Amino acid sequence: MSSPFFHARRMPVGIGQAGESRSASGGIGGMKTAVIGRHGVGRMASEHRFTINLQPEPEGGYTVRVPAFPEIVSYGLTLEESMANAREAIELMIEDYREDGRDIPADVPTRIEQLTVAA
């Protein structure tokens, strides 16, 4: 029943390990901050924090978006799988950005508010 979401330039997202995370905010959907560490050949280790938006889906699972990388849309049946998929997608995007000579974007914190409208 899960529909595969694909990384913009690589392969289906779905393999990886969930790493550190901390709650960034509550509210609709929910947000977490993923810590991504990469050890490239000849590069110093570095960590980057990225806010991810986790939108619960009616059929179960979560759709995952990363504001710093708008091209990422992923999905996981559980919170753990969603975090692992987000980590893998972010790591692949960082790899693509480095290969293309682009700077890794800064985190884009997201604020969630509720708005009441007449319907």
Image (cartoon, rainbow, N blue to C red):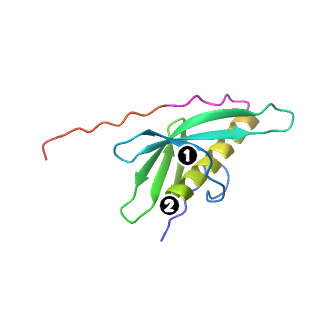
Q: Which residue is mark 2?
A: 78
Q: Count residues near mark 1 (Cα–Cα under 10 Å), then give few for <14, some for 14-19, many for 20+.
A: many
Q: Position of residue 73 (x, y in %)?
A: 52, 50
> Was residue 12 drawn as part of the magenta stretch in this picture?
no
Instruction: Give the amino acid at mark 1.
Output: Ile
- Residue at image x 64%, y 50%? 88
Q: Nearer the viewer, residue 62 or 17?
A: 17
The type of residue carrying mark 2 is Thr
Where disc 2 sits, the SS reads loop
Q: Residue 52 — which label?
A: none
How far apart are the two marked residues, 1 and 2, measured between alpha carbons? 18 Å
- Is 79 or 101 nearer to us in this picture? 79
Q: Residue furthest left?
A: 118
Percent from the top left, x then y, of residue 96? 70, 40
**Stretch of the chain drawn in magenta:** 101-108
Q: Which residue is mark 1?
A: 72
Q: How many marks?
A: 2
Find residue 100 and report its image quarter. top right
* Main secondary structure found in the magenta portion: loop
Circles 1 and 2: CB distance less than 8 Å?
A: no
Q: Residue at x 38, y 48 (%)?
A: 29
Q: Where 75 sits versus 37, above or below? A: below
Residue drawn at x 50%, y 67% as measured from the top left: 2
